[in-house]
Image (tube, rainbow, N blue to C red):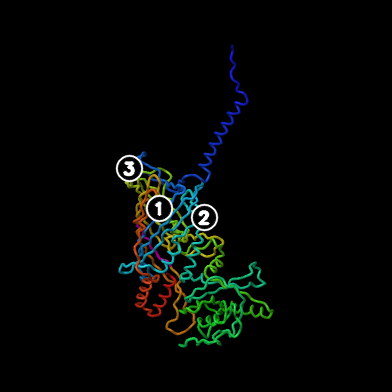
Amino acid sequence: MRREAPATGRFGRGKNFVLLGFVLLFGFLLLNRYFFESDRGTIEVLSDGRFKLSRSDSSNEHERRLLRLVLAKNSSYTFAETIDQEVSTSIMGKEVGEQKQKIYMEFVLHVDNIKSDGAEVTVTCKKFEIVSFDDDGKPYKAHLWETMEAVVAGSSFSAFLGNNGTLLKSDTAHIHKKVFEELHKLDALPMELNAILTIPRDAASDVESLEESVNCLGTRFVNRPSGTVKAPMVLAQPRTACECAPPIGSTGHRWSGAHCRLKNDVAGKIVVMIRGECNFEDKLILAQDSGAVGVVLGDTEDRELVFMGGKSEKVYLPAVMVQKVDYDRIVKHIMRADDASEEYVGTLRHGLDAFQYDNKTPNDAIDDLLGYNYLLEDQLKKRLTIFPNEPVGRGDSWERTVQTDTPVPHENYEKYTMEGIFKKVIGENYRWIARVKVETKESPLLTRAPRQSSAQSKEKRPPLISSASSHNLKGGESGVYDIDVVSGLVLHGEVEQKISGSHSQSGPSAPPVGNARSDSSFPEPTVVKIDTSISAHSFLCTTTVAFGDCSQVIKPDKGSGRRTFAMQLRSRALVNARTSDDGEKQRQQTMHMMKHVY
């Protein structure tokens, strides 16, 4: 009897198609998860392709290894560095300081998520400490650096790490804002960031903006105003605002009493007065006692503006000085508004508010005045972007030249040479380590101006902590890195750096000589030549939870006591100035200039 073969009809073929579909779908999901989705397990930081590789005859092909950095999701990496630094500074050919410092930095990079074009990371500053040393080698902490340490240590921000090791979209605006505010309190900001006065724009103007900025300078008293004051502007009565104040040049002091007030009602208003007859301090105190919320002081002559300053701790009122032409214009507008029974409203901005208005920048585009981003970028650059895209062995070298614009255009030459691979015992285990020699050189590109965005009309200012690329300095560094072959982490490194150069800077002139009470203007600003030489010895390391040791690198020296910033520098400036040909005048000019240069 003939047995029929089982039927493989439409239903059987359908099952096969379903199974094939499931297999294809599963394969697609795996590929999508590995190449496109955000839950990949690791990221490999690749070379940017600019390295030129030179092969050595002393290395065989089978000995070469592909060095690349591998970072894992949900893992943290600690980058630490200690820098022994010595800075020598000369002004106009005279040595004014030799500062020795020890800088400790520790950043933690946590990989939050990994995507096809990079990784979402969180960066935390664990340590930022600068310890200075006096002539006897005794450590101390300068007040400026101690304040900056309190601002940045413990702070975190989110960022995106590109596949080429570049840190993108760093959300550091809140840190820059805190730094700015603290520098403002310490009177350590550049003088052009002092204050902004805006007034209503003339109706005949064809500019769309409703207000215009008036050229002005603010105050240099102990208390530093901040924030914004917007109020009606009124003319002081009397206009000189010298009630109860001794005349300029008198040795007497201002007296007080209920009658020591302006004759008109200025409460809650910005009062406009004129320069002369008595000191700035007396004018501002009279305005304060009369209830004013701000002062605009007009000059009586066509000349350069000066800061209103002094040692008084009683003055806290926001105030600016304007040139005669602007004063005359403001007075005319106020009188016209009074005749029409209207208010003429002005706005005074100080500190961060003044900076953001002057640069027309939003809240997320604050200048990095400390150099925090530079510190971080430098830490990552020397660890993440140093590998070629081909395997290397003993004697092989790779080099590149990179141009930067932050903030002074520089050309940076980098060369790395593989010295060999050795086995290092760590506890009960061991790791293969590649020793790489490092050589770099950087020099300014004086023929090319830095690029600027259309929203920023002023050049970026060199930060407090910076590299040669922040000034017209040149030099280089040399050293060695010990790199874990499997992970690509720089476990240890030791680098020597030497940079030097000079640049000219317009320094403010000195205040009047002697104790006479005067508001006369300072002499013309002096163009000074500043020579700088920096030598540094750095120790760096990287650790993870699994391996690495940074305990010796980030172990701080104990600072004993606290000193005013640049006390040593200023004391030497005094000594040099006293022995100069210009005598007392040169001494005061040097002291006044040092305050702003440093």
Q: Position of residue 310 (x, y in %)?
A: 47, 79
Residue 274, x across and y down, in percent: 56, 82
Q: Nearer the viewer, mark 2 or mark 3?
A: 2
Question: Secondary structure of the magenta portion, mostly?
Answer: strand
Residue 179 in the image: state x and y as whole percent: 47, 65
- The segment highlighted magenta reads 495-503
Quadrant of the rendered structure where residue 136 is? bottom left
| Image mark count | 3
**Vertical comparison of 243 with 303: above or below:** below
For residue 92, say whether it is visible.
no
Q: Is residue 140 left or right of residue 523?
A: left
Q: Which mark is residue 58?
A: 3
Q: Which residue is mark 2?
A: 169
Disc 1 crowd rating (10 Å Cα; few below 14, some 14-19, many 20+) is some
Q: Decide: marks 2, 3 in contact (CB < 8 A)?
A: no
- The three-letter amino acid code for the residue at tag 3 is Ser
Question: Which callout, 1 or 2, points to the residue nearer the camera?
Answer: 2
The residue labelled by disc 1 is 414
**Secondary structure of the residue carrying numbered label 1:** strand
Earlier in the chain: of badge 1 and badge 2, it is 2
Please state, as top left, top right, bottom left or bottom right, where the N terminus lies in the image.
top right
Measured in 3D between alpha carbons, the distance from the residue under mark 3 to the one under mark 1, in whole angstroms, is 22 Å
Q: Residue furthest left?
A: 136
Q: Is residue 120 left or right of residue 11?
A: left
> N-terminal of the two: label 2 or label 3?
3
Task: Verify CB contact (< 8 Å) between mark 1 and mark 2.
Answer: no
Viewer-nearest residue: 411 or 215: 215
In the picture provided, is 315 more to the left or to the right than 346?
left
Which of marks 1 and 3 precedes in the sequence?
3
Mark 2 to mark 3 CA distance (whole Å):
43 Å
Q: The residue tagged with tag 2: helix, strand or loop? A: loop
